[in-house]
Amino acid sequence: MFAKAMAVESIREYSEGKILSGLLALAIENCKFDSRDSTIVLSLVFHSAQKLSIDTTALFERVAELSAPDAANLFRNFVTRAVAERSIALFGYKEGEDPPGLFSYVPCE
């Protein structure tokens, strides 16, 4: 999924623009396939944004204002979750490296 790739690339390149691209991709997708899948990927984008010290509440709200209702609700509800409920581990991921040794999100074992 493009948004997951943007979550990873944002860390590799220290790029807020990649975070925004990931969020916009999720906004376009608008939870049409399965909102649970969108939430998993959103947790990675959110985690990356926090690692980059981005104001996640403001950014997610900015994108929510541009989004259709389903995606807007996903963004707004995610940022208001308790910290433990936004953890990438809760969604089955952890920080790691891909085979070339670059930052990636890898499945928890």
Image (cartoon, rainbow, N blue to C red):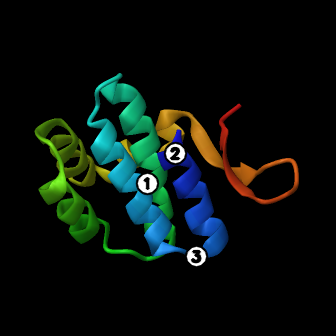
Looking at the rendered image, the disc whose residue lies closer to the viewer, 3 or 2, is 2
Q: Position of residue 57 (x, y in %)?
A: 24, 65
Q: Residue at point 38% right, 74% down?
A: 54
Between 6 and 74, the residue placed more toward the observer is: 6
Looking at numbered disc 1 in the image, what kind of residue is underneath it?
A: Gly
**The residue positioned farthest toward the front in the image shown:** 28
Looking at the rendered image, the disc whose residue lies closer to the viewer, 3 or 1, is 1
Q: Please, what secondary structure does the residue beneath circle 1 have?
A: helix
Between 28 and 104, the residue placed more toward the observer is: 28
Q: Residue 2 — which label?
A: 2
Q: Please, what secondary structure does the residue beneath circle 2 have?
A: helix
Between 54 and 30, the residue placed more toward the observer is: 30
Looking at numbered disc 3 in the image, what kind of residue is underneath it?
A: Tyr
Q: Residue at point 31% right, 66% down?
A: 56
Label 3 or label 2, whichever comes before in sequence order? 2
Looking at numbered disc 2 in the image, what kind of residue is underneath it?
A: Phe
- Judge whether 46 appears above or below 70 on screen: below
- Quadrant the C terminus occupies: top right
In the image, is 90 to the left or to the right of 68?
A: right
Q: Position of residue 62 (x, y in %)?
A: 19, 65
Question: Dot 2 surroundings within 10 Å: few (below 14), some, or many (20 or more)?
Answer: few
Q: Residue at point 79% right, 49% down?
A: 98
- Judge whether 54 appears above or below 42 on screen: below
Question: Dot 1 surroundings within 10 Å: few (below 14), some, or many (20 or more)?
Answer: many
**Disc 1 designates what residue?**
22
**Disc 3 designates what residue?**
14
Q: Quadrant of residue 39?
A: top left
Q: Position of residue 34 (x, y in %)?
A: 34, 23
**The residue positioned farthest toward the top in the image shown:** 33
Real-space Cα distance between discs 3 and 1? 14 Å
Q: Residue at point 23% right, 59% down?
A: 63
Q: Please report contact status of discs 3 and 2: CB closer than 8 Å, yes or no.
A: no
